[in-house]
Amino acid sequence: MEFIDQLSGVLSQVRAKRPLVHQITNYVSVNDCANIVLAYGGAPVMADDAEEVVEMVSIASVLVLNIGTLNSRTIQAMLLAGQEANARGIPVVLDPVGVGATRLRTDTAQRIMTEIKLAVIRGNASEIAVLAGEIAATRGVDAGSTAGNTMLLGQELATRLGAVVAITGAQDIITDGCRTILCDNGHPLLTRVTGTGCMVSALVGAGVGVTEDYLLAAAAGLVSMGLAGEYAAEASSYGNLGAFRSHIIDFIGNIAPSHILAGARIHVHA
Amino acid sequence: MEFIDQLSGVLSQVRAKRPLVHQITNYVSVNDCANIVLAYGGAPVMADDAEEVVEMVSIASVLVLNIGTLNSRTIQAMLLAGQEANARGIPVVLDPVGVGATRLRTDTAQRIMTEIKLAVIRGNASEIAVLAGEIAATRGVDAGSTAGNTMLLGQELATRLGAVVAITGAQDIITDGCRTILCDNGHPLLTRVTGTGCMVSALVGAGVGVTEDYLLAAAAGLVSMGLAGEYAAEASSYGNLGAFRSHIIDFIGNIAPSHILAGARIHVHA
Amino acid sequence: MEFIDQLSGVLSQVRAKRPLVHQITNYVSVNDCANIVLAYGGAPVMADDAEEVVEMVSIASVLVLNIGTLNSRTIQAMLLAGQEANARGIPVVLDPVGVGATRLRTDTAQRIMTEIKLAVIRGNASEIAVLAGEIAATRGVDAGSTAGNTMLLGQELATRLGAVVAITGAQDIITDGCRTILCDNGHPLLTRVTGTGCMVSALVGAGVGVTEDYLLAAAAGLVSMGLAGEYAAEASSYGNLGAFRSHIIDFIGNIAPSHILAGARIHVHA
């Protein structure tokens, strides 16, 4: 079967299975991350305290950890939930927001990578470079430039962790170390709304909750968000950011296999 | 006076008195809960720390407790604020989000029900069944199905606590144990946007802040949200979720007694 | 150069320099505060824990402290970040949300004013009156009325602290104690959406991050938000609050020097 057909199959499965996506995330984009999972067809739950995350993750289809606004309480919750997820075979997705900007973020991401088996890591080029051990001049939570070859760093990280690495940017890279998919969907306006990176990680999580082919699940999430950006840019006259944000959710709520079949601009890296 | 006339009177009083609605709530829908109270005509304040909630609730018209994302800090704040509200005769509304999904939620809801006199509890059928002591297979924060008769459970809970119980679903049930109102307003798209349950509890809170007839206040909140869902579904072409969410706020900001008189689909259960 | 030309120059500099605006803020409007900074041309980062704020603020252009939902963890983070900002010459903006409503807010604002050198304080008339030592009947986070002369209180506070004081209301007042600017832009609907005050403080922060003329930066932020309110009121048919909120972000994302030159209604107080 063609890869593009399989991508649209992830979407169909999300709608059919309605995965429960447990997210422990930041207080900036938490509402958007819940709404985009609902729009995609999943069911979000955002419990973030150590007193309840172990129980909550045990009934979830997938766990998404996002380090956008960390504190000692939520770090503890992330580690406990991640360990329980591992013990139960529930897949875990990591969004290492702003890693490299502070010691707390770098140490926490490192600790999560060491103590928890991850299914997918979704970040921008700077964040992935930091995780891959490169020195990157991360500027807050922005996507900075990196000296190294982003694709190679992603492939190395994927191989080292046995996880899929999904790197968003002008051209997205999704790799498990062996297979590498490149995706050209998206729009620059996605960088002008907060939390679009967090939202794509949430979509990846929903996909990971319904298929064991995490490369496929990650690609489906990135293609879906890319198509949403293209649609929303046009629908908002290429510049109304409030409308753009709302149209992202409109599109994800209505996305059908036909949109992916007609619009996905992906190819397998030779 | 007809019940439907009284409903529209709640709305008029909210606009006239502008109740200060103190909400201690979750970090997912907190912004929506503030905005919908403002749109309805109330004034929201969201202080959630033990160091200030006692003072803040003392100047409020009503307190709304929502257990959507609990932690030890906010649990303490809820209990302190609730006790102070009781001492001052300020009514308290509880939204037991996801109760039954974890021990922390169930214990906290139980503790609130035991230690604080409640004016209204607003939940879905699963949540009310858990509170009523039934075993319900709550699935995260979703509305699950319950074996028992939802109306009977609600009536028993209302009688036991001396509170109004408002149960949202395809058909809403509002009961004080003696009188029971059924409401058919609403739209399925309300289940595809996060926090619509929290928002209806916030509207109930605003109503409770202006009248001692809590059954009426609760019914006014549920009818208003139901009408908003119906309007927003049509205004968003029955499927654009970003637009739908925005139109909910549009409608609540513009709702007039005439909308309730023309659109409310309620009847008293015989 | 005309003051109005200088105002539009602030906007151009925000777009050219893309200041990193570190905000430690409340959980109600945090998403809006991030999005409006992005729309204006800045880069937001919202780290709020003592374990990372010192590092984060050291790479920021400006620090914005907002006391809308305080707790002991975030108070500590605000003080540490503020002291580090002072040590590095990074300007600090304070939004004293609801000061006067509780002892915690009043004490925290007082402590911030005592321990941290501020560039700008942005509040409503009640909040500024409290800070200026007047007794104001602050009603939650609302703008209440004050007995004193708001302009004089603002000028005294500005002189005492060596900071710019920006007071939003039907007529905005921006003063450094010597120069005082009055601004008539804005629309009453801005009071019917939560967080518009927080958002204008975020815009002020972005301006303060690119120019040492804090009076100018503050005026640019207030004029921009005022113009956004005027645009959004018209674009949302003067009453659709969901649409109004979205159009605020549309406008700030598209605001150009020409909008300020054509629309600013400001004059220097004689």
Image (tube, coloured by chain):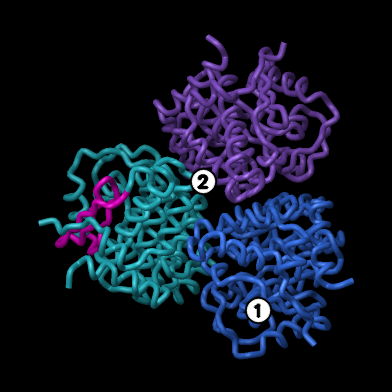
Chain colours: A cyan, B blue, C purple
Residue type highlighted by circle 1: Gln
Q: Which residues are magenta?
A: A160-186
Left or right? Give the position of B206 relative to A49.
right
- Residue C129 position (above or below residue A113): above
- Residue drawn at point x = 45 percent, y = 53 percent: A247
Q: Position of residue B194 (x, y in %)?
A: 54, 63
| Disc 1 target residue | B171
Left or right? Give the position of A17 relative to B254.
left
Left or right? Give the position of B132 relative to B102.
right
- Residue drawn at point x = 56 percent, y = 84 percent: B145
- Residue drawn at point x = 86 percent, y = 73 percent: B2
* Image mark 2: chain: C
The quadrant where residue B63 appears: bottom right
- Residue B122 position (above or below residue B235): below
Q: Position of residue C102 (x, y in %)?
A: 76, 44
Direction left: furthest residue: A270
Depth check: give the residue in front, A109 or C36. Answer: C36
Which structural element holds mark 2?
A: loop
